[in-house]
Image: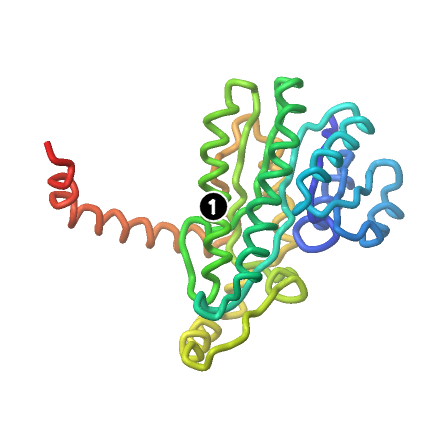
Amino acid sequence: MSKIILITGASRGFGKLWAKALLQRGDKVAATARNIEDLKELVEEFGDSVLPVQLDVNDRDACFDAVNKVRAHFGHIDVLINNAGFGLFGAIEETTEQQARAQMETNFFGLLWVTQAILPVMREQKNGHIIQVSSFLGLVSLPVLGIYNASKYAVNGLSETLASEVKDFGIKVSLIEPNGFSTDWSGASAFQTEPNPVYDPIKKAFAEGATPDTWGKPESTTGAVLQLIDAEKPPLHFLLGKIAYPGVKQVYSERLAEFEAWKEVSANAHGH
């Protein structure tokens, strides 16, 4: 049975790839983009199966209007894929207030507004699946991506809480947490801070640490994402790519060992 799926940020990268895969198998997709012209290719290829929606997720009222438009057009919404976002590269000290706020505004608040807009629809339906496109950098962190890391940690904390709040309404929540993939995220969609030379060695080491094999092939993700969408009991955390699991496992093992080393000091701080 075909599904009705709303995807934000569907004009490029993962959003466009997944939208096409869903449409090719017979699902219907409401695809959003800041510039509706960027969705022209999808409309030309798939016709009435795709509903193009112009949306800047930073505009909360527009998010509610977009969701209402999609529900009015298709009758219901089975799945939300909250995909809109971008990467900000640079050291924390280099980051301007405007850059930091813009990163959080889109990656966190934009995702929150669309989530809030979809919840009344899915509660009324008594079913639905909210898929938040986060990152394995919402579980671990890397240098020169500090504000991006922070935005994805915020998305993870929000979504874990959301899952506990909405499960009794029949709503499922999943976090897609990719490692690096060769999408526009690190290219055309990325923003850079004004460099401070004192951070050049860290940036150089970061760049040299990435091999061609580090970056996954975006087109290889479609089967896994379709499997996630179709799962009767989808996971809350869904790592994407072969780098994510060993990286997360190492960091969490080290974190647990550190907690263990300080557990007596921590317990004594309780006071009784």
The front one of 206 and 67 is 67
Q: Residue at x 77, y 32 (%)?
A: 70
Check disc 1 and give the amino acid type: Ala
Q: Residues within 10 Å of mark 1 (few under 14, many from 20)?
A: some
Q: Residue at x 55, y 62 (%)?
A: 88
Q: Residue at x 89, y 41 (%)?
A: 47
- Residue 103: x and y in percent read 56, 56
Looking at the rendered structure, the secondary structure element under dot 1 is helix
| Quadrant position of the N terminus in the picture | top right
Q: Residue at x 63, y 55 (%)?
A: 218
> Is 175 rendered above or below residue 148?
above
- Residue 202: x and y in percent read 41, 74
Residue that numbered label 1 is attached to: 154
| Quadrant position of the C terminus in the picture | top left
Q: State how many labels appear.
A: 1
- Residue 159: x and y in percent read 50, 37
Task: Specify whether 113 is left or right of 261.
Answer: right
Task: Specify whether 49 is left or right of 104.
Answer: right
